């Protein structure tokens, strides 16, 4: 590299560091999670508990997908959280189409279409949770501010934030192909894709991946890739399984959930998922080291600074599903920079960000043993001493839920027929109840953190899965018998698997409600301040809420909290955005959405007015009402 190029690279990298350092959330929302550490907190105070009932719809924006995508909408989930930067609101549709909007009116200013092949099949359907923004000084006006997006078919695209045109100096006319390569037209199933926003820090763009579960032992590796933010040149790659012992067989351990950045320490914090296959790990002997772990990497070279594992030798699909949230936490008088990590198990780990050691102590507790033939389970699992689990994790036949003796009896029989010895009961040929189910506890929506008051707000789902291992010789017959259910091969393993939600003949969960909750946790003590049901069944079965009451529902999407004392959240399986009193958990307001709100809301101040914005497009996994709108609320005149 020529001397001039070296100087330019240093200047640009320094500018990117500075941009990331000063661009805190404040009353804006410059990052997917509000700030680079994912606190989902806003200092905006115009909307308060006293006036929140005056919220009305200010504007709406349609991506147009309902008219243009046809049957592909059945495989789409509008999980996007917009960002506000450069005087524009940036939205990505499930099909990776980026729109820049006027923050005050929702009017489209520009649009970019990467032209995905919508006939492709991806492991998690069509999803774009967000995009990333960065300032590139010294670019002579062209692409001086950029939007970065990773697409479902494994492209990393850099756009000029001012006009939406690809940046010609980045890769090949604005596009870099992310290894192992683009999922191209002509192939009908993509084994690997990307769903969460990239992160930009210290002059590099970092991307993760999403890989299908339960397909094969020798799955693709979940390597994290970093690229030069200006040129797109490859900088480094981190494979979480590269350090496994000789003889280890397995893939995945990918980073599908959002990442976080610690600008000051020069770290990117990864939520690493489980290694393949999910429910039998006899060929991946050991704990997995970096799998199922919070891993902090040095952004300059991708080397490991520290790691902390939340599940040893995972055979429950209890991968880390949510963005690690960074903040200053004061626990029992000790204030340290921390990582707050919610999990599918309904646990909340609090880790010292400087060394990877628990701030709130974690104990190794003995867990059920007696796995399937060939399995080598960990005898213990890490459990934080506080807070208490936020989701139920044990059930007996006598706990079965039902509206009548008949359906309750069916649920009682289903629970009695399965193996269940509490949390971490291993999968079996008999059929094992996984509780909480593999959708959470907490999922990709993560948590919101009010650092001023040291309070975490987090939502959970409470359902049970029945996971049954299937002998290889019986697999073909089982797949034919249970057509329409999730029956996966686990190629290379002695067992296939089947996973179903444990529900009554009337399709109600067999475990007692609440089936979805919102919680507040005081991090000073680890005490749960309140827990309330989240959502109703009214949009699943009309008028059912009058029979069932406040059950809550399974949910996808997360909360955000404001300095005025409000927690906003959609996520539930009814079509509402809700506002809760942050002090008490009382529901203060709800706004009717045109479709499912399985996304995390955001808020910002624009020309003296505070807006609350959420994507309302429904979700393929929850089968909520589909749509293509972004809805903004503000106080009425």
Image (tube, rainbow, N blue to C red):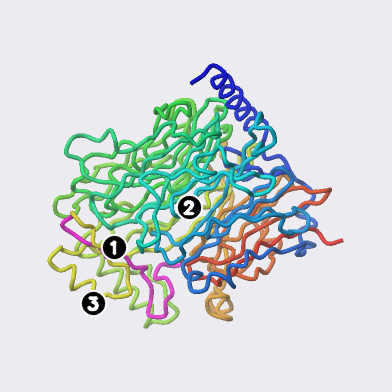
Specify whether 464 is left or right of 470.
right
Residue 309 shown in magenta = no
Specify whether 257 is left or right of 67.
left
User: Counting other residues with Cα less than 10 Å from the Cα at mark 3, is it few (<14), some (14-19), or many (20 or more)?
Assistant: few
Tell how many labels: 3
Residue under the point 28% across and 67% down: 487
Numbered disc 1: secondary structure: strand
Residue 592 horizontal/vertical position (percent): 67, 69
Residue marked by disc 3: 481
Numbered disc 2: secondary structure: loop
Specify whether 208 is left or right of 37.
left
Residue 427 horizontal/vertical position (percent): 25, 57
The answer for how far apart the CA atoms under marks 2 and 1 are is 26 Å
Q: Is residue 103 above or below residue 28?
A: below
Q: Nearer the viewer, residue 234 or 284?
A: 234
The answer for how far apart the CA atoms under marks 1 and 3 are is 16 Å
Residue marked by disc 1: 467
Q: Residue furthest left?
A: 473
The answer for how far apart the CA atoms under marks 2 and 3 are is 32 Å
Q: Is residue 80 above or below residue 245?
A: below
Region of the chain picked out in magenta, as a range:
493-514
Residue marked by disc 2: 195
Q: Is residue 10 above or below residue 531?
A: above
Decide: marks 2, 3 in contact (CB < 8 A)? Answer: no
Residue 383 horizontal/vertical position (percent): 38, 42
């Amino acid at each position: 590299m020529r001397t001039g190029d070296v100087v330019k690279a240093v200047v640009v990298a320094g500018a990117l560091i500075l941009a990331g350092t000063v661009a805190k959330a404040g009353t804006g929302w410059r990052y997917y999670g509000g700030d680079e550490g994912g606190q989902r907190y806003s200092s905006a105070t115009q909307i308060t508990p006293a006036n929140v009932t005056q919220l009305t719809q200010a504007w709406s924006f349609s991506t147009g997908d309902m008219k243009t995508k046809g049957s592909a909408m059945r495989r789409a989930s509008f999980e996007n959280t917009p960002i506000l930067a450069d005087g524009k609101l940036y939205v990505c549709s499930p099909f990776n189409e980026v729109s820049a909007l006027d923050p005050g009116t929702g009017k489209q200013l520009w649009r970019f279409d990467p032209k995905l092949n919508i006939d492709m099949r991806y492991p998690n359907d069509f999803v774009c949770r967000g995009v990333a923004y960065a300032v590139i000084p010294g670019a002579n006006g062209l692409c001086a501010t950029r939007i970065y997006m990773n697409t479902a078919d494994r492209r990393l695209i850099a756009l000029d934030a001012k006009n939406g045109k690809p940046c010609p100096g980045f890769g090949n006319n604005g596009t870099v192909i992310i290894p192992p390569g683009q999922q191209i037209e002509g192939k009908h199933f993509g084994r690997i894709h990307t769903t969460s926003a990239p992160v930009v820090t210290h002059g590099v763009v970092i991307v993760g991946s999403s890989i299908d579960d339960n397909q094969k032992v020798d799955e693709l590796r979940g390597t994290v890739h970093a690229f030069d933010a200006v040129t797109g040149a490859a900088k480094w790659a981190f494979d979480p399984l590269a350090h496994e012992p000789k003889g280890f067989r397995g893939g995945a351990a990918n980073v599908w959930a959002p990442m976080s950045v610690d600008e000051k320490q020069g770290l990117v914090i990864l939520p690493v998922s489980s290694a393949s296959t999910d429910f039998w790990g006899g060929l991946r002997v050991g704990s997995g080291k970096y799998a199922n772990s919070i891993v902090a990497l040095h952004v300059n070279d991708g080397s490991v600074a520290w790691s902390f594992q939340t599940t040893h030798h995972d055979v429950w699909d209890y991968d880390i599903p949510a963005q690690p949230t960074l903040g200053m936490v004061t626990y029992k008088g000790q204030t340290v920079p921390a990582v707050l990590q919610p999990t599918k198990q309904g646990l909340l780990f609090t880790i010292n960000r400087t060394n990877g050691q628990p701030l709130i102590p974690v104990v190794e507790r003995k867990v059920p043993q007696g796995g399937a033939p060939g399995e080598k389970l960990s005898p213990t699992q890490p459990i934080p001493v506080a807070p208490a689990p936020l989701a139920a994790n044990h059930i007996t036949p006598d706990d079965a839920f039902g509206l009548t003796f008949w359906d309750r009896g069916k649920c009682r029989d289903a629970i009695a027929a399965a193996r269940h010895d509490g949390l971490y009961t291993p999968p079996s040929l008999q059929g094992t109840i996984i509780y909480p189910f593999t959708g959470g506890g907490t999922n990709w929506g993560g948590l919101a953190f009010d650092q001023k008051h040291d309070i975490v707000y987090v939502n959970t789902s409470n359902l049970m899965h029945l996971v049954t291992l299937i002998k290889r010789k019986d697999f073909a017959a089982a797949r034919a018998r249970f057509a329409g259910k999730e029956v996966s091969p686990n190629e290379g393993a002695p067992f296939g698997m089947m996973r179903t939600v444990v529900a009554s003949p009337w399709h109600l969960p067999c475990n007692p409600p609440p089936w979805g909750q919102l919680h507040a946790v005081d991090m000073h003590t680890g005490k749960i301040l309140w827990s309330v049901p989240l959502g109703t069944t009214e949009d699943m079965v009309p008028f059912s809420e009058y029979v069932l009451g406040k059950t809550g529902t399974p949910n996808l999407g997360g909360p955000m909290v404001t300095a005025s004392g409000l927690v906003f959240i959609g996520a539930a399986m009814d079509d509402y955005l809700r506002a809760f009193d942050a002090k008490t958990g009382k529901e203060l307001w709800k706004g009717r959405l045109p479709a499912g709100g399985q996304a995390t809301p955001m808020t910002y101040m624009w020309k003296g007015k505070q807006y609350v914005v959420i994507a309302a497009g429904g979700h393929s996994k929850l089968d909520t009402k589909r749509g293509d709108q972004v809805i903004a609320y503000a106080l009425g005149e």
